[in-house]
Amino acid sequence: MADSADAAKWAEDLWRNDRVAGELDVEFVASSLGHTTVRMVVRDNMINGAGSCHGGVIFTLADIAFQGACNSHGRLTVSGGATIDYARPAKLGDTLVAECAERFRTKSGGTYDVTVTREADNALVAIFRGQARELVLRQNT
C-alpha cells in the first residue's frame, strides 16, 4: 500500500502526463492517500453561450481531481461512472478549486466526492461523485 508521500508523487505524475489538464492549465495543489486538490482559472475559451463557464469544463476539472485521489493508492484506477450537480455558475476570471475526498474504498474500487468552489469566496460551484474501478492487468501467457 502507498504512503502519503507515494500518494502525492503518484497523483502528481498522473497530473503531469494528463494532456487535458495541461490544455486547461489545471494546477496541481496537493495530494495524500484518497485526497487530491487542483485549481484552474476560467479563461475566455471556457465560456459557453450563456456567458458562464461551460459545465463540461467544470466536470473535467472535478474529474481530474477524482483521478488523482482514486489513483493515490498506487494502483491504476479509472472511472466507472460519475455524476455532477451544479450549484452556481462560474464566470470568466474565477479561480475554481476542486477538492476530492475518498468516501470508501474496496479491494476493486471506491466512491469519491469532489467539491468545486470559487476560490475568492469559497462559494460552492458543483458537487461531483465518482465511482472508481481498479484495472486488473493480466499478462498474456
Image (cartoon, helix red, strand yellow):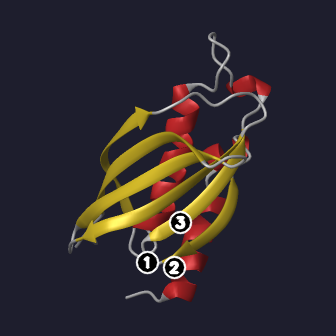
Foreground pick, 10 / 3: 3
Looking at marks 2 and 1 on the same chain, the residue that comes earlier in the sequence is marked by 2
CB within 8 Å, label 1 to label 3: no
Relative to 50, residue 97 above or below: below
Single out the mark in the foreground, 1 or 3: 3
- Residue bearing mark 1: 74
Single out the mark in the foreground, 2 or 1: 2
- Marks 3 and 2, Cα distance to the nearest angstrom? 9 Å
CB within 8 Å, label 2 to label 1: yes
Looking at marks 3 and 2 on the same chain, the residue that comes earlier in the sequence is marked by 2
- Marks 2 and 1, Cα distance to the nearest angstrom? 7 Å
Residue 133 image-quadrant placement: bottom left
Please name the residue shown 63% across and 10% down the image. Answer: 49
Please name the residue shown 39% across and 35% down the image. Answer: 85
Q: Quadrant of the C terminus?
A: bottom left
Residue 105 image-quadrant placement: bottom left
Please name the residue shown 37% across and 63% down the image. Answer: 77
- Marks 1 and 3, Cα distance to the nearest angstrom? 14 Å
Q: Is residue 120 left or right of residue 38?
A: right
- Residue bearing mark 2: 7
Q: Is residue 80 visible?
A: yes
Q: Residue 106: x, y in percent?
A: 21, 72
Q: Is residue 114 left or right of residue 107?
A: right
Single out the mark in the foreground, 3 or 2: 3
- Residue bearing mark 3: 36
Relative to 13, residue 49 above or below: above
